[in-house]
Amino acid sequence: MNISRRIAVPGLVRIKKNALSRLGIYLTRGEHTQVAMVVSAGLPETIRATVNTGLAQEGVATVQWFEIDKNDFETVAEFFAHMPNTLHAVVGLGGGKALDMAKYLAFLAQKPYYAVPTSLSNDGFCSPMASLTIQGRRRSLAAALPHGVVIDVDVCLNAPRILWLSGVGDLVSKFSAVFDWKLAFHHKGELVEDLAALLSDASVYQFLANPAFTPQGLTQLGTALMLNGIAMEICGSSRPASGSEHLISHALDEISTRPRLHGLQVGMATYITCRLQGQQADTIDQVFQSTGFWDAVRTDPFSREEWLAAVALAPSIKENFFTVLSTRQCLSEVHAILEEPVLDGCFV
Ligand SMILES: [Zn+2]
């Protein structure tokens, strides 16, 4: 079978040192000299200054500057209503909320979008979806991949290490997601797009060769997370990046009194779902030991009670979405997994 389809992928990708100071150069090359900046509130002054100086040097005008502390549809619609049509591009700078708002604003306005994450805590910076709330409920809305991805390696290495660990958790979840996708094929006949599945798997292996908090390790994590977003765009679904482990994390977001970073929840859930799937759990354990992921969880353990409730709720989170959690009643197995020595101290 040959699926003929055109997809728009990022034409500009810079994952390197000092990339932030060169943002103006990249925008000018794309002839995008009138931009809207959508920026995380509370972003360090040094980052703002670096960007502003770089833009000014290249004659890029910041026509609008939005500070973001929430990611809701209502606010982004308001931004869109006041957007001048002389604008060339939208730039998202900072964390996940600002990037989701920028991505969706660009999508509404049909303008090129530049993703400039200042940490790598999940794969959202280059996914074709925007996570926003509508009337208080979290929704994943269809959007488009960025026109450009600019990741300053030094800036991301200066971000809190827990954010990097969250990115590692979101990345390894692809093992569980791709396995679930294949289960859905065997049980329900849901078509697996081989190239998207392969790209997703391969991106994880590439990172596992060097899972270090170093410039090289960070470059590989950024590349791998970006390729996951492209895998989603190739097949037009979130299947290559999201399976049972994401359902558990979404369930936690709904019921937990204190939801944690997306990638921390997803990473822990991935270990559990890989154990249920009977594959890759040892690999996940090794990478979590070597990166310090388990240690980070132990410093602020999850609630056992909330996790068991989340596992029970997870299969109902998304309709017609077959995963390992659909194959059998898994709750008693998960109960036993949480007591295993590997997870000692991770739950209270
Ligand atoms: Zn994720």
Image (cartoon, rainbow, N blue to C red):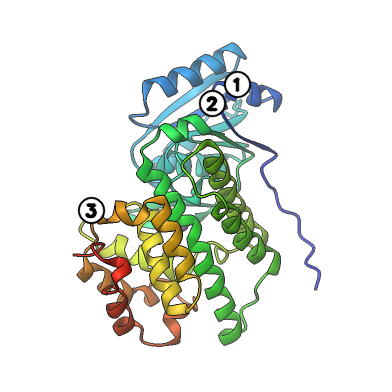
Q: Residue at x 41, y 57 (%)?
A: 288
Q: Which of the labelled discs sits on residue 115, or is there none? A: none
Q: Residue at x 41, y 68 (%)?
A: 271
Query: Please, what is the three-letter code of the amino acid marked with disc 1?
Result: Gly
Assign the C terminus to one quadrant of the image: bottom left
Viewer-closest of 113 and 253? 253
Q: Which of the labelled discs sits on residue 20, or is there none? A: 2
Residue under circle 3? 300
Q: Nearer the viewer, mark 3 or mark 1?
A: 3
- Left or right, 251 with respect to 258, comes to right
- In the picture shown, does residue 1 fall above or below 122? below
The answer to whether marks 3 and 1 mark residues whose Cβ atoms lie closer than 8 Å is no
Secondary element type, mark 1: helix
CA–CA distance in space, label 3 to label 1: 40 Å
Q: Nearer the viewer, mark 3 or mark 2?
A: 3
Residue 148, image x, y percentages = 63, 37
Residue under circle 1? 24
Viewer-closest of 145 and 206? 206
Image quadrant in which you'd find residue 109: top right
Secondary element type, mark 3: loop
Label 3, ligand 1: CB separation under 8 Å: no
Query: Please, what is the three-letter code of the amino acid marked with disc 2?
Result: Leu
Query: Mark 2: few, some, or many residues within 10 Å (few <14, many ≥20)?
Result: many
CA–CA distance in space, label 2 to label 1: 9 Å
Residue 304, image x, y percentages = 22, 69
Q: Residue at x 27, y 69 (%)?
A: 307
Label count reads 3
Residue 214, image x, y percentages = 49, 38
* First-in-chain label (3 vs 2): 2
CA–CA distance in space, label 3 to label 2: 33 Å
- Left or right, 293 with respect to 22, comes to left
